[in-house]
Amino acid sequence: MKKIFFFRAFLILLTFVSLFVSCSDSTPVINSVVSSVIFQFNDETSIPTTRISLFASTNEIQRVEQMRAVNENTGLVWNISSPRKFQSKDNVSWTGYTNLVSASGSSIPMGRYDLFYTDSAERECDANFYISYPKDYIEKKSSDFPGAIQSSYSTNVALYTVDGSLLFYGKKKKTWSTNEMILKDYMLADTIRICYGISNDSVIIIMPSHKIRQDVEKK
């Protein structure tokens, strides 16, 4: 799904989770890990879909073969056979995936995870990271937010084209008092989503999308 690609735009904003690293050889090396639990509302009445966005920074990103995340409490395993690769604005290379989901009907396990990285020479490196989120969010509806957030949070907006490609992700500009003002800056924008980030974006709530251009054309 194209919309999950917008998380590439703010992965560089995430604070690194607690990390302990060990390797079977001098290379490869996992330098950092970032993860986000994502609650996405697709409409006003349904409970959210949930997934994990998980990326690692390594010294040999071009040689990555596969990645594997294992929850230590439940044994749940996510195998990433074709990790995505990109470079952030600060020239840090990342590899991972944005759509790790649990089996239907089950929630994402919290606690400590082991992340295993294997390169093309079958050398393996591993690191630990942690997943935590307010469990009651699983049964919430979009109308419960942001009121349901019990701690400080950040607010960002995401703008998409009609085919779901990301145009913008970040703080809403002060000049965007109306949809017309948004279209002056991003004439290809079709929909907008409000996104709430908690604990340095380790938890992200994505609100339902709303049409921009249709609202303007109706006036």
Image (tube, rainbow, N blue to C red):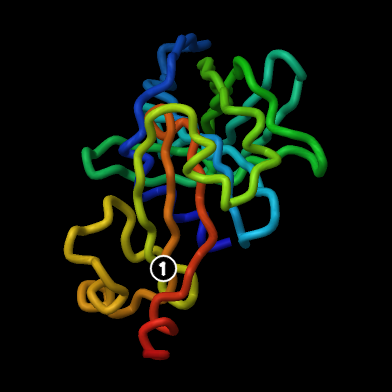
11 over 35 or under it: above or below = below
215 over 48 or under it: above or below = below
When asked about the image quadrant of residue 215, the answer is bottom left
87 over 24 or under it: above or below = below
Q: Number of callouts in the render?
A: 1
x%, y% of residue 92?
A: 29, 35
- Which quadrant: the C terminus? bottom left
When asked about the image quadrant of residue 12, the answer is top left
Residue situated in front as seen by the camera: 158 or 145 = 145
Q: What element carries label 1?
A: strand
- Which quadrant: the N terminus? bottom right
Image check: 102 left or right of 154?
Answer: right
Q: Which residue is drawn at 21% across and 78% down?
A: 184
Q: Of all residues shown, which one is farthest toward the left?
A: 175
x%, y% of residue 203?
A: 49, 34
x%, y% of residue 160?
A: 41, 68
**For mark 1, does the 10 Å Cα neighbourhood hold few (<14), some (14 to 19), or many (20 or more) residues?**
many
Q: Of all residues shown, which one is farthest toward the bottom?
A: 218
Tag 1: amino acid: Tyr
173 over 19 or under it: above or below = below
Q: Residue at x 53, y 15 (%)?
A: 128
When asked about the image quadrant of residue 212, the answer is bottom left
Q: Which residue is drawn at 33% across and 55% down?
A: 169
Q: Of all residues shown, which one is farthest toward the right?
A: 105
Image check: 55 left or right of 77?
Answer: left
Residue situated in front as seen by the camera: 209 or 4 = 209
Residue situated in front as seen by the camera: 152 or 114 = 152
x%, y% of residue 162?
A: 46, 77
Q: Which residue is drawn at 48% across and 28% down?
A: 150
Instruction: Write down the residue under mark 1.
Output: 160
